[in-house]
Image (cartoon, grey):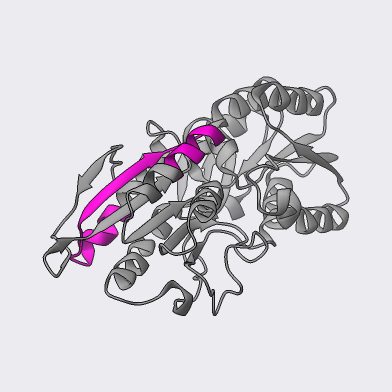
């Protein structure tokens, strides 16, 4: 049962004309977009569609130069290409995309969308007054690591040990941003916390297989572009190893994962269009405060719950925005 519909995704790796022709002195304005996911990823396409919808709602557009980059080498190359085009403003979807663009320019305005810790990662001086050439919209706060563990324990109360999975190369603070709250929640819930940094499918398999060797193992997948791109093996291995897992976006649940809770990142992408337009109209990133998320989503896959032998509590069924049967 789907209670929420997402905007259909749009693709593209080159210039993409949008509603209207934003001009100043007869010059068509240029917007660069760097997305930290593969161009075939439904989640990435949905976010990009949200951004273009936001531009259309504002009646504003121009030429969009779009790059998709799910790995580090392509990210660096794509960031260099976009900066070389000298766009009027750039949108960075994801922490790694933001970092790549920041390394290439200190002058072109950058709006980031769906990142975790812009202060800790050195993107801005502060949330109210970012300073520099970056500002934007964050997707999660540090307490989120604890919230995910609490939800997992609600649906699987018999867990004895839970691993927090993340890629330190793309996670805020190398993983530390969410781990403090995760470890505090584990002490409160009396489960053993496991820190599980991963960089490859082989390491993903090693973590999940280890959790499944004995009953009572659970998995928290932290917000991370890497885990989004590698969600297929994570979901498959969790099912094979009989490991209950909680995720941070509903795309995992649609693909067979158990439970997800997190911000509506399509909405964040749509909202980010407002800052892009304000900058094109002459405002400075340093004067635009970093925005917090406003919409959250929960999804549950009842088929997966049954396969794991779990009974979904009414508290989750009544709260979920999307229930897959």
* Residue at image point 65% right, 46% down: 222
Say whether residue 215 is left or right of residue 269: right
Q: Quadrant of the N terminus?
A: top left
255 to 123, vertically: above or below:
above
The residue closer to the viewer here, 168 or 110, is: 110
**Is residue 3 something that shows in the picture?**
no
The residue closer to the viewer here, 39 or 206, is: 39
Residue 37 x, y percent position in the rendering = 46, 38
- The boundaries of the magenta stretch are 51-79
Residue 12 x, y percent position in the rendering = 28, 37
Q: Is residue 149 magenta?
A: no
Residue 139 x, y percent position in the rendering = 53, 59
* Residue at image point 83% right, 28% down: 215
Residue 157 x, y percent position in the rendering = 77, 44
Q: Is residue 58 magenta?
A: yes
156 to 188, vertically: above or below:
above
Kindly indicate the quadrant of the structure image that contains residue 287: bottom left
* Residue at image point 39% right, 36% down: 42
């Amino acid at each position: 049962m789907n209670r929420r519909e997402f905007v259909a995704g749009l693709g593209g790796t080159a210039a993409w004309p949008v509603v209207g022709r934003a001009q100043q002195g007869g010059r068509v304005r240029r917007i660069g977009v760097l997305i930290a996911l593969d161009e075939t990823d439904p989640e990435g396409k949905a976010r990009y569609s949200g951004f273009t919808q936001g531009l259309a709602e504002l009646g504003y557009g121009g030429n969009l130069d779009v790059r998709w980059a799910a790995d580090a080498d392509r990210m660096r190359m794509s960031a260099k290409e976009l900066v070389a085009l000298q766009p009027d403003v750039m949108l960075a979807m994801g922490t790694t995309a933001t970092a790549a663009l920041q390394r290439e320019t200190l002058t072109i305005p950058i709006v980031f969308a769906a990142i975790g810790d812009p202060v800790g990662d050195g993107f801005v001086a502060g949330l109210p007054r970012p300073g520099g050439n970056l500002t934007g919209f964050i997707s999660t706060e540090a307490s989120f690591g604890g919230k995910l563990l609490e939800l997992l324990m609600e649906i699987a109360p018999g867990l004895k040990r839970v691993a927090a999975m993340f890629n330190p190369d793309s996670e805020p603070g190398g993983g530390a941003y969410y781990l403090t709250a995760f470890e505090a929640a584990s002490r409160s819930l009396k489960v053993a916390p496991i820190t599980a940094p991963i960089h490859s499918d082989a390491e993903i398999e090693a973590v999940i297989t280890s959790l499944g060797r004995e009953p009572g193992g659970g998995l928290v997948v932290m917000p991370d572009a890497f885990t989004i791109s590698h969600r297929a093996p994570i979901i498959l291995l969790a099912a094979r190893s009989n490991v209950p897992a909680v995720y941070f976006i509903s795309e995992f649940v649609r693909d067979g994962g158990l439970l997800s809770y997190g911000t509506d990142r399509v909405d964040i992408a749509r909202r980010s269009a407002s800052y892009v337009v304000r900058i094109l109209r002459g405002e400075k990133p340093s004067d635009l405060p970093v925005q917090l998320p406003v919409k959250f989503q929960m999804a549950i896959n009842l088929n997966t719950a049954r396969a794991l032998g779990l009974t979904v509590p009414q508290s989750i069924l009544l709260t979920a925005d999307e229930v897959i049967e």
